Image (cartoon, rainbow, N blue to C red):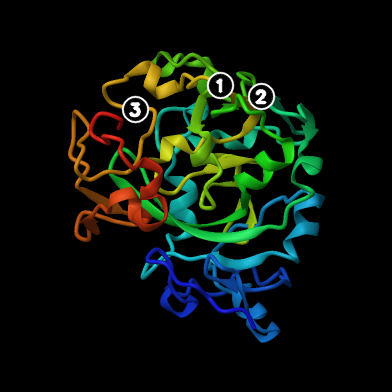
């Protein structure tokens, strides 16, 4: 029996608010894990893991996803004392400007996105560059469920159960060279199926680009997600492949990735290029560094409403300080925001 090593950002499965019966039309088999140390649970707990999410819309999962789902490591990481955001809120309140500027546009327009076939280019300072069909790209990795807090720079937040695998596993597989210091990501450019790319909104120079320092990308919490709420990613949430970096503002977690490049110099990123005084390269969640137009000290946790605003204090590094603060030792986070 493996022993769980708890961290401040984790909790037991019993501390998470149950979300009811998840997709009764599906039978979901697989292992169940709790804690970043991935302690094993007995098979009797597997059915409970498969019934945690209510009102999850059925998707159209590709074969490779369905095949991998049975061996998922459930609750590999959990969110301490947090209730999971309802699926409808997580999928109908989004920023994905490729589909339009309003929060409802991604859900309204996302069906136009074609996610099959899909390929990912890996290039730059790597020993194994290439273009990989998505099913080949994800084949070596076991899916994990990771329940992470998501904090938007606009001061709203959610708690989402992602399905994916550590980004570090991919980076090790492609063998970074000694010159690699940063990882650059690029999303799909497809104006025909992404109407927001035809609008010229915010003068964005498509495709959308993001980046991480290599040590950030190699951190165990950084992941590539291919699913959420026990099913494949909906288009509006970044299907079929997105980045999730839970200690950073949400705009760093780039969606619908088609290229991952390892580079020697800090890459330019979309929002930093548009407004460098508002959106820095690091974009770490930091309640002491305000956005020029609003405070970052508090956040609105969804769902919320006029009579139940659900406002709470923002945590440093979004509550993951114990795990990631050492990455920034000696760095002035007020200047390197």
Q: Is residue 297 left or right of residue 95?
A: left
Identify the residue at horizontal 75%, vertical 29% (top origin): 127
Mark toward the start of the polypeptide (1 vs 2) = 2
The nearer-to-camera label among 1 and 3 is: 1
Secondary structure of the residue carrying tag 2 is: loop
Quadrant of residue 174 in the image? Answer: top right
**Along the viewing direction, whichever of 130 and 302 lies nearer the viewer:** 130
Nearer to me, 216 or 88:
216
Residue at figure coordinates x 70%, y 83% from the top left: 43
Q: Which residue is mark 2?
A: 125
How far apart are labels 2 and 3 at the CA level? 24 Å
Is residue 241 depicted above or below 36 in this figure? Answer: above
Q: Residue at x 52, y 23 (%)?
A: 208
Q: For the residue carrying disc 3, how many other residues have a C-alpha within 10 Å: few (<14), some (14-19), or many (20+)? A: some
Residue 237, visible in the rendered structure: no
Mark 3 lies on residue:
280
User: Is residue 321 toward the left or the right of residue 187 in the image?
Assistant: left
For the residues bearing labels 1 and 2, Cβ distance under 8 angstroms: yes
Q: Is residue 279 above or below residue 319?
A: above
Position of residue 153 measured from the top left corner of the image (x, y, whole percent): 32, 38
- Point out the image quarter for the N terminus: bottom right
**Which residue matches tag 1?**
264
First in residue order: circle 1 vs circle 3 = 1
Alpha carbon separation for disc pair 1 and 3? 19 Å
Q: Nearer the viewer, mark 2 or mark 3?
A: 2
Q: Where residue 307 sits: x, y (%)?
A: 19, 59
Does the image show residue 115? yes
């Amino acid at each position: 029996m493996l022993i769980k090593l708890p961290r401040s950002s984790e909790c037991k499965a019993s501390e998470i608010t149950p979300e009811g019966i998840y997709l009764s039309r599906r039978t979901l088999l697989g292992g169940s894990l709790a804690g970043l140390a991935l302690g094993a649970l007995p098979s009797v707990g597997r059915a409970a893991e498969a019934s945690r999410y209510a009102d999850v819309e059925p998707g159209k999962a590709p074969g490779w996803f369905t095949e991998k789902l049975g061996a998922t490591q459930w609750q590999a990481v959990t969110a301490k004392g947090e209730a999971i955001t309802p699926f409808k809120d997580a999928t109908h309140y989004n920023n994905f400007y490729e589909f339009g500027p309003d929060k409802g546009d991604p859900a309204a327009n996302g069906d136009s996105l074609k996610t099959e076939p899909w390929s990912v280019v890996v290039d730059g300072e790597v020993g194994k560059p290439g273009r990989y069909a998505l099913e080949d790209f994800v084949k070596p990795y076991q899916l994990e469920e990771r329940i992470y807090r998501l904090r938007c720079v606009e001061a709203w937040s959610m708690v989402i159960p992602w399905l994916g695998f550590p980004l570090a596993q991919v980076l090790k597989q492609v063998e970074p060279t000694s010159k690699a210091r940063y990882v650059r990501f690029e999303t799909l450019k497809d104006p025909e199926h992404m109407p927001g790319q035809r609008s010229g909104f915010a003068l964005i120079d498509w495709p959308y680009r993001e980046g991480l320092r290599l040590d950030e990308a190699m951190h165990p919490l950084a992941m590539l997600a291919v699913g959420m709420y026990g099913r494949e990613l909906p288009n509006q949430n970044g299907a079929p492949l997105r980045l999730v970096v839970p200690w950073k503002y949400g705009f760093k977690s780039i969606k619908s990735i088609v290229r991952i490049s390892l580079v020697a110099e800090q890459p330019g990123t979309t929002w930093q290029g548009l407004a460098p005084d508002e959106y820095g390269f690091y974009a770490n969640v930091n309640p002491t560094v305000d956005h020029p137009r609003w405070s970052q000290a508090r956040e609105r946790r969804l769902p919320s409403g006029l009579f139940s605003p659900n406002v709470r204090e923002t945590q440093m590094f979004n509550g993951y300080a114990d795990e990631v603060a050492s990455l920034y030792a000696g760095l002035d986070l007020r200047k390197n925001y």
